[in-house]
Image (spheres, rainbow, N blue to C red):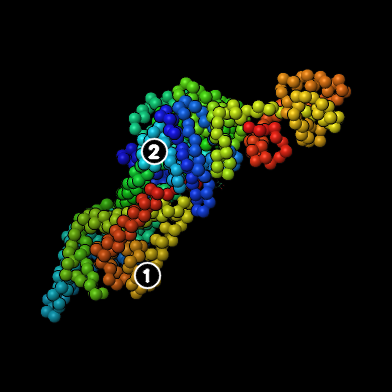
Amino acid sequence: MIPLIYNEWLKMVRKKRIWVITLILLVLIPIFTYAQFRTIQQTVAEMGTSDWRALLQQQIIDQQNRLSSSRLPEEWRDWIKLSIQQQQYYLDHDINPTAPGAPTFVRKFIEESVSLFLPLLVVVLAADIVSSEHTAGTIKSLLTRPVQRWKVLLSKYLALLLSISVLMMITAILSYLISGVIFGYQGWNMPVLTGFQEQNGQLITSFVHLVPQWKYILMAYGLAWFTCVAVGTLSFMVSVLVRGTAASMGVMLAAVISGSLLAQLAPTWSMLKYFAFTHLRLTDYLSGKPILIEGMSLSFSILVLSVWSILAILIAFITFQRRDVLA
Amino acid sequence: MTNPTTLLSVSNLTKKIGKREIVHNLNFNVQPGEVYGFLGPNGAGKTTTIRMLVGLIRPTAGTIQINGYDLQRQFIPAIRQIGCIVENPELYPYLTGMENMRLFARMMKNVSQTKIDEVIRLVELDQRVHDLVKTYSLGMKQRLGIAQALLGDPKLLILDEPTNGLDPAGIRELRTFIRMLATEKGISVFVSSHILNEVQLLCDRVAIIHHGRIVKTGPVSDLIDQHPQVEWTVDEWEQAQTYFKSLPYITTIQKRAHNILRVQMPLEKIAETNAKLLQEQLHVVGIRPYQQTLEDIFLAMTGGQTDDSANL
Ligand SMILES: Nc1ncnc2c1ncn2[C@@H]1O[C@H](COP(=O)(O)OP(=O)(O)OP(=O)(O)O)[C@@H](O)[C@H]1O
Ligand SMILES: [Mg+2]
């Protein structure tokens, strides 16, 4: 199996797909970094003062005053306490929360890119992995070897998983290195709030806690990896079903984009929650951003993506195993 | 029915695509060390048959046995006996020749670098093997295609119209190469073609396929015309025709172009006939033994013309 995976990896590298994607990241990350930098400058300008320490001090005092008021519900208290802890940490470690370091950029970048940008790159990687062999006719050279068809397909799938992982790593490394030039490389231990839950449309904060940023980034990348694998698996199936590379890429791009658009356009349409591509923003469950469609939770999203992926794998393997190679 | 030494045995092979029956009930056997021709015009079903032989498509009915292994039920051992090129040599253009070879070698067991070097030397590609395949000419791709087919030490080589796109020198070279494989290495070669002459020059035995059905199988010598024809170009063709009728060894006469007569006659009588025509003051401007084509065979078989010279 290892030699087969190596073959597929070699094709991917020599087709220069990975390099094209690295190049895209190399162009886009500086742009995002600069955009972030502009936003921070704007915020600083609006605050009218560049003395963020004084501002933080004031915020902490305000929050403490609210705590001493007795009419506050219990979970709000915990929430405020956490918030004070977080701000105290900023003060103690001399971190300006509005002008954070590279790790914060890494975190924000993955949170924003998981819904559309990374899935699109994954589609570019995956959409032609089988269809290109049909288009080029090399499928005939592959399937007339003493190797079972399902093994050929499995080696392609595993090579895809490998390249998705490499894509995530390149994204993380490049966004850290590039944004650090402007923001500095500090901030791995900065506390970040997480543990939000939603029930009946209400944000439940009772499980909210602080985690160091590096831990948060690991979790966010894990979830983003899962999203990308799900998108990759679906593209993989389309690549088996559709013979042309252009067609299979088109189908997948349309699906990914409409998934992210539909969730915003028609959040009340509850059927949408069974559609795989409305579940790509897994990191939102970490950061506590409001979820658009009702009745979605992290475990539900993971379940939906898993079911779609398993079906896609089954369809891909059964089709590939049986189909006549005519082209 | 199945001779124990038979290398490839095809019986009752049928393929339907949709409602169309592309090939119908094919039966033939290929013996070790022979070059077997698969002759048929465009669209006869040659490629479809070959795709079934190498496991790319499933037969609707019938069986394929390769060196005793059933291709459907024992795919891996059966396909190990085979090396093939289906239609074009399909290679990865963005890899070098050597990288292509190593890639295919990794899909088989026990193919060493020595073996790779050996087959590359065999097809005389050692000079360019480290260049990208997209810089290769068609002839070089064809050689690399054959090299990859030979990697697994196949007992049977299956080639689909291998001379397509090659120049006459390339075709001659390929022919010599295929004969060498059969005689020196004992490899059987199954080669499809739509050119009768090519099959005559290359093959030991032949199956002729037409509209998806085998219309004839047998040794190639059966194909070679027992009744050779000669085309005479004579200015006074009407007189020549009358004169030909008087000769006992001329059986049929056919007028082709405005001054060409195709007659069936023994080739050794050409000089004698020419001399006689000269005596008759007839101006012979051309004499050419006629190369029979596949169409002639079909025409003869279906009796589509009065021309009965090609009776096989
Ligand atoms: N995928 C397909 N669907 C339907 N019909 C097909 C398909 N592939 C081939 N055919 C038909 O099957 C017949 C045989 O095709 P095939 O390619 O086997 O012929 P061939 O003998 O190889 O011809 P050629 O000398 O042109 O290569 C043709 O009439 C063709 O139209
Ligand atoms: Mg063909």
Q: Secondary structure at mark 1?
A: helix
List the residue tagged with mark 2: B70
Considering every residue shown, the one lying at the far right of the view is B281
Q: Which mark is residue A264?
A: 1
- Locate the N terminus of chain A by quadrant: top left
In 3D space, how far apart are the residues under numbered discs 2 and 1 (Cα atoms)? 57 Å
Q: Is residue B231 visible?
A: no
Q: Is residue A162 left or right of residue B143?
A: left
Q: What x and y, as percent, mark residue A124? A: 41, 52
Please, which chain is the residue tagged with disc 1 on? A
Nearest to the observer: residue A267 or residue B242 = B242
Q: Residue at x 72, y 36 (%)?
A: B307
Q: Quadrant of residue B262?
A: top right
Q: Callout 2, which amino acid?
A: Asp
Nearest to the observer: residue A170 or residue B81 = B81
Q: Quadrant of residue B244?
A: top right
